[in-house]
Amino acid sequence: MGQIHLLDLASQQARWLTVRQAAVATNVANANTPGFTAGDVVPFEDVFNDSSIRMVATNPGHIGVDPLGPDQIATKDAAAWETTHSGNSVSVENEMMKAGEVNRSFSLNTSIVKAFNQMLMASVKG
């Protein structure tokens, strides 16, 4: 039996959602820090489109770039939301909307994997 790409894709999205939730949590934790710039991750579509071509580490000493690693959190443009006088660009309302999106996406991802798993089990059992 070959590799099941749907499960690999679901795993990749779950990792991306974990990184995005960490970025949201960092933003909320620093909502009152003077000069803090809110960060966000690149959209999952960009990660998915870039995942087909990867550099392979042929030696354990090679350093690979993980597109879903915590160091890939990019600083976003604060122009869409207001920046306070202290230089902080975190909007708690915006971060709560992002947290809701992450929660809904994770629930959908989990439901799809669960349904696919039930379908596979039904086909294996005969």
Image (cartoon, grey):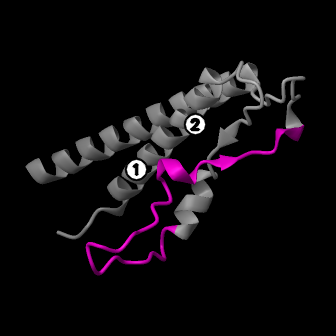
Residue 84 percent across, percent down from the top left: 87, 23
Hey, what amino acid is under mark 2? Ala
Residue at horizontal 62 percent and vertical 47 percent from the top: 41
Hey, what amino acid is under mark 1? Ala
- Would you say residue 33 is visible in this rendering? yes
Depth-wise, is mark 1 or mark 2 nearer the camera?
Answer: 2
Please state if 31 lies on the left or on the right of 109 as rendered: right
Q: Nearer the viewer, residue 96 or 106?
A: 96
Residue at horizontal 39 percent and vertical 69 percent from the top: 63
Residue 25 percent across, percent down from the top left: 56, 27
Q: Which mark is residue 23?
A: 2
Question: Going from the N terminus, do you reach mark 1 or mark 2 first?
Answer: 1
Q: Which mark is residue 75?
A: none
Badge 1 element: helix
On whether residue 33 falls in the magenta region, the answer is: no
Region of the chain picked out in magenta, as a range: 51-79
- Would you say residue 126 is visible in this rendering? no
Report crowding for label 2: few under 14, some 14 to 19, many 20 or more residues within 10 A (C-alpha). Answer: many
Please state if 123 lies on the left or on the right of 6 as rendered: left
Q: Which mark is residue 10?
A: 1
Q: Nearer the viewer, residue 102 or 93?
A: 93
Badge 2 element: helix
